[in-house]
Amino acid sequence: MSATRQPAGEPPRRRGRQAEAERNDRLVLEAARTVFAEQGAGAPMAALAEEAGVGIATFYRRYGSKEELLQRLCLLSMRESIAAAREALAGDGDGWSVIAHYVRRCVAARVGALAPAAGTIAVTDEMTAAAELGRELIEELAARGRADGSVRGDLVPLDVSYLVEHLSRIPRRAPEQVGVCQRLLAIALDGLRAPARVSDLPGTPPTWENYGARWYGGED
């Protein structure tokens, strides 16, 4: 009997190990994105491990090197950008609304946070293919906005890319920092409109107390 029960019990154990590995991988990737976004591509692996709450060995079991980890994160970010562009282009709004949808989703996912890694890691074939597709989609987004006159006529696709990149790197470890990102995003998106329009800014205005606390070791 024991010989027949043992095989029946093995799949759940494999699933358990797989689930744990997937959970650890998500922790690793989320922590790495956060740390790289705020400290740059030169952030030590120890900082990533601390953020994820795992040992450094967990990183190296999944990724052989920091470069491999960065390559994976860059590819995932580009795929998220592609998905956001396709979702936006499928919408029924005007060109500005389409671009705004794309930018908001990309900034929320911090897809531009790893841009400073450019030139520091090897570019894989997968990364090249994703980058080319992403560029085509962003060009389509910008063209749609210019075609219906809802965005300023001098907008170029890279304006959108750089906007995502810069807003993706704003620290978000405190509620006020999240609010600052949302307000700057609203200001920037209004700047793309044609004719010019002004939206109500979201959230609570930032305070000088919290702004200065960053320099004096106070709470964010």
Image (cartoon, rainbow, N blue to C red):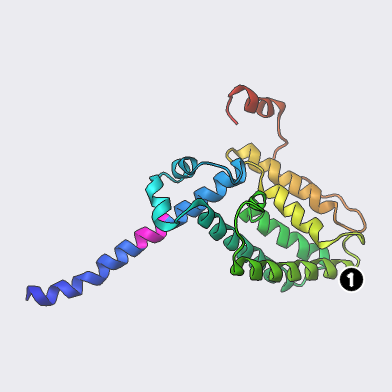
Query: Which residue shows up at 65% across the image and 71% down it?
Result: 129
Residue 195 visible? The answer is yes
Query: From the viewer's perspective, is residue 110 above or below residue 102?
Result: above
Is 109 left or right of 144, judged from the image as shown?
left
Q: Residue 218: image x %, image y %?
A: 59, 24
Q: Quadrant of residue 184?
A: top right
Front residue of 187/114: it is 114
Q: Residues within 10 Å of mark 1 (few under 14, many from 20)?
A: few
Establish if 186 lies above or below 156. above
Figure label count: 1
Indicate the amino acid at tag 1: Ala
Q: Main secondary structure of the magenta part?
A: helix
Query: Magenta residues, as a range?
Result: 19-24
Image location (x, y in percent) of residue 67:
54, 54
Reading the image, the residue beneath label 1 is 147
Q: Tell me residue 173's x, y (percent).
A: 57, 39
Using the image as rendered, state which of residue 71 and residue 13 is in the foreground. Answer: 71
Regarding mark 1 in the picture, which secondary structure is present there?
helix
The structure residue drawn at horizontal position 77% and vertical position 45%, both measured from the top left corner, is 201
Q: Quadrant of the N terminus?
A: bottom left
Can you name the residue that lies furthest to the left here?
A: 1
* Residue 208 drawn at (x, y percent): 72, 27
As for residue 20 lying within the magenta part, the answer is: yes
Residue at the spot x=60%, y=55% of the render? 121
Using the rendered image of the protein, determine whether residue 172 is visible from the camera's viewpoint.
no
